[in-house]
Image (cartoon, grey):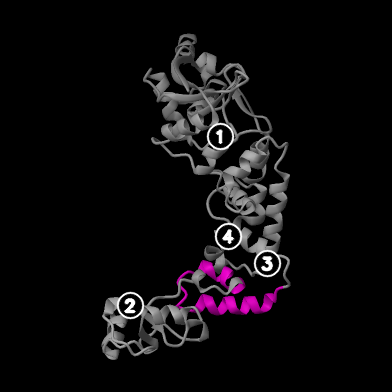
């Protein structure tokens, strides 16, 4: 890896600055990609960008910025996007500082700003070296998400197109599926979720295989199919908003979307499970009604007091085999299983030796 520290004047930075919704944001004579595919949207408010201009006005140093050198000799910003856009917007007259736009300043005031030197690290290296670099500089400040880091390594036509669907405020993925997704579109969490669904969790493998695809239409079509199936299978209400966000809908879709399901029966069972105090993981209800695996529900466990009371009541004798055991050699059990209507209450609590409990659980 090659890293070089250089001084870049604001005059050089703002040269050919352009902000185009379709083509992105460029500066530095058109050679600097200010908003690469993995970067988040501009999030600075008035207070933050005023602080940037105030620092420049007073001649104080801004934090060092990081640019990656591309194979074609152009550059992309890794760290410093918000500061760069703030500076360019001010010089181009998009906002005023202390009630004065850049064009209202005297010539010497303008020149002082244009001559201001920014410290920039230029980095060249392989994809793996770049990823290590990103992770290192990401220790300080607001960290990039894992997906933002992946986008940096596998940037290209595929990521750029995927971002169009999944990575902006009010994006189409949010419009059709926001009520089922956790996280933020801007922080690339919608994109991460969609890729995880389609790739069965092998996100980096999928991105490396499709990095140079001309578009991300396959991902978008798959995502639409998942959301359409969820909408048709489960009832969404405002009360269920919290528990329906973040479910692994892709996994359920892949397994069950070809099956004919009794949606009315599913809805009736979901209502009952939501009201069941023994079900501590309400998000798992949607997987349970399809898989019948209780592990998704995290059924409420007996308390330590209930375990001890059952052990004393049984005088250390296993309720199945009749053998005597120490408390540490026994496990708590529902006399009537939860799925058969048994509750997590003292009257339904018994102690079994480990062997008997495993035998019963395996039935």
Crowd tier of the residue under label 4, counting other residues whose Cα lies within 10 Å: few below 14, some 14–19, many 20 or above: some
Residue 167 in view in this figure: no
Crowd tier of the residue under label 3, counting other residues whose Cα lies within 10 Å: few below 14, some 14–19, many 20 or above: few
Crowd tier of the residue under label 2, counting other residues whose Cα lies within 10 Å: few below 14, some 14–19, many 20 or above: few
Give the mark nearest the N terminus, 1 or 3.
1
Distance in Å between CA atoms under marks 2 and 4 = 30 Å
What residue is shown at x 62% (from left), y 67% (from top)?
A: 236
Lateral position of residue 57 relative to residue 101, left or right: left
Q: Position of residue 5 (x, y in %)?
A: 43, 17
Return the residue at label 1. 153
Give the mark nearest the N terminus, 1 or 4.
1
- Residue 283 included in the magenta stretch of the image: yes
Marking on residue 303: 2
Figure check: 214 above or below 70: below
Return the residue at label 3. 256
Circle 2 SS class:
loop
Marking on residue 248: 4
Circle 3 SS class:
helix
Rendering quarter of residue 234: bottom right
What residue is shown at x 52% (from left), y 63% (from top)?
A: 242
Distance in Å between CA atoms under marks 1 and 4 = 26 Å
Q: Which residues are magenta?
A: 261-290
Between disc 4 and disc 3, the foreground one is: 3
């Amino acid at each position: 890896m090659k890293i070089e520290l250089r001084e870049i004047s604001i005059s050089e930075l703002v040269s050919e600055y352009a902000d185009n919704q379709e083509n992105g944001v460029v500066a530095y004579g058109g050679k600097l990609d200010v908003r690469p595919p993995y970067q988040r949207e501009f999030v600075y408010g008035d207070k933050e960008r005023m602080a940037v201009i105030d620092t420049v006005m007073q001649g104080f140093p801004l934090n060092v910025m990081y640019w990656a050198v591309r194979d074609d000799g152009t550059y992309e910003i890794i760290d410093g996007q918000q500061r760069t856009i703030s500076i360019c917007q001010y010089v181009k007259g998009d906002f005023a500082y202390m009630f004065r736009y850049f064009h209202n300043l005297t010539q010497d005031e303008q020149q002082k700003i244009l001559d201001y030197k920014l410290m920039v690290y230029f980095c060249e290296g392989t994809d793996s070296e770049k990823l290590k670099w990103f992770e290192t500089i990401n220790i300080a400040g607001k960290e990039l998400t894992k997906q933002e880091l992946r986008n940096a390594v596998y940037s290209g036509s595929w990521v750029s197109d995927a971002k169009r669907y999944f990575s902006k405020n009010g994006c189409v993925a949010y419009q059709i599926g926001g009520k089922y997704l956790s996280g933020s579109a801007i922080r690339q969490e919608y994109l991460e979720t969609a890729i995880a669904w389609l790739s069965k969790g092998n996100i980096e493998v999928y991105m490396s295989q499709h990095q140079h695809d001309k578009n991300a239409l396959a991902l978008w079509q798959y995502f639409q199919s998942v959301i359409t199936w969820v909408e048709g299978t489960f009832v969404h209400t405002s009360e269920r908003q919290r528990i329906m966000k973040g479910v692994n809908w892709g996994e359920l879709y892949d397994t069950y979307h070809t099956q004919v399901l009794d949606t009315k029966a599913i809805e009736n069972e979901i209502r009952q499970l939501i009201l069941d105090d023994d079900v501590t993981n309400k998000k798992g209800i949607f997987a349970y009604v399809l898989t019948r695996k209780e592990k998704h529900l995290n059924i409420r466990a007996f308390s330590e007091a209930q375990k001890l009371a059952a052990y004393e009541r049984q005088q250390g004798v296993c309720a199945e085999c009749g053998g005597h055991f120490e408390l540490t050699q026994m496990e708590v059990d529902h006399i009537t299983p939860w799925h058969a209507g048994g509750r997590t209450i003292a009257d339904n609590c018994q102690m079994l030796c480990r062997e008997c409990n495993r035998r019963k659980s395996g039935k």
